[in-house]
Every structure is written in C-alpha cells, then in structure tokens.
Amino acid sequence: MFRDRGCDNCETYIKMRGHPDTVTDCTSSTFDGCVALFKPDASWVAKFSHINSFVPGVYAAHVTGRIPEYIEDKLAQRGFTYHPRDGSAED
Ligand SMILES: [Zn+2]
C-alpha cells in the first residue's frame, strides 16, 4: 500500500509512493498491538501516542526498529519530532 499510494500522513515530506527502498527503510512488519484511531483530535490515547494529528486509521502501538537518521533529519527540518515506537523514548 505504501509503495502504491504513499503514506496518508507524511507523503508530502517522505516520498514513499513509487520508492520501494524508502518504504523498506521507513516501515516494519514487526509490531505489537494496535490502536484504531477514529477521532484523532478527541482521543487521549492518540495524544499519548503522538498520533493525534494523523488521519483516522489503524496504527501499531509498539514497533521494532526505527526510521533511518536521514529521514529523522528530514522531518526535523520540517519541524516534526520523531517519536520512536520501539520503547527507547517513553514519555
Ligand atoms: Zn507516514
């Protein structure tokens, strides 16, 4: 889906559509649990998980792996803070 359609949340910044290497770098098939997000701006869980500005959908709760540093830098340049879901940055 990411290869064909890109990401509904970050396609503007991270071009995944048509870039399989970027999809491989930025996604993981190893995760635990999921959060079904219906009303992002009204959900405490969404706020706690830093997904309250994301489009409605189903998101992994805990992910093995991180995005590469060059993607993290690209996001930081656009003013976005990366919140890893690998348990390394609990807050
Ligand atoms: Zn995305």
Image (spheres, rainbow, N blue to C red):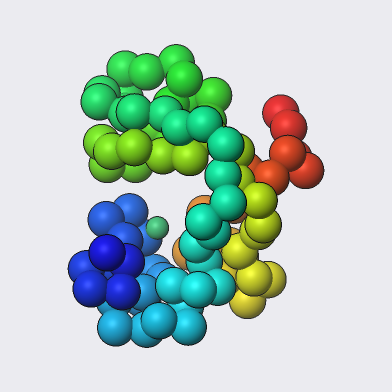
Q: Which x, y percent locates residue 20?
A: 40, 81
The residue shown at (50%, 62%) is 27
The residue shown at (34%, 28%) is 36
Please, is residue 28 above or below residue 33 in the view? below
Instruction: Name the one closer to the observer, 79 or 90.
Output: 90
Question: In the figure, is residue 83 to the left or right of 56?
Answer: right
Q: Which x, y percent locates residue 38?
A: 25, 25
Instruction: Name the one closer to the observer, 79 or 4.
Output: 4
Q: Which x, y percent locates residue 44?
A: 44, 16
Q: Quadrant of residue 7?
A: bottom left
Question: In the figure, is residue 87 to the left or right of 28?
Answer: right
Question: In the figure, is residue 35 to the left or right of 32?
Answer: left
Instruction: Name the one closer to the observer, 90 or 25.
Output: 25
- Which residue is situated farthest in the right direction here? 88
Report ligand 1 position as a quadrant: bottom left
Q: Is residue 12 visible?
A: no
Please, is residue 6 above or below residue 15 in the view? above
The residue shown at (41%, 39%) is 59
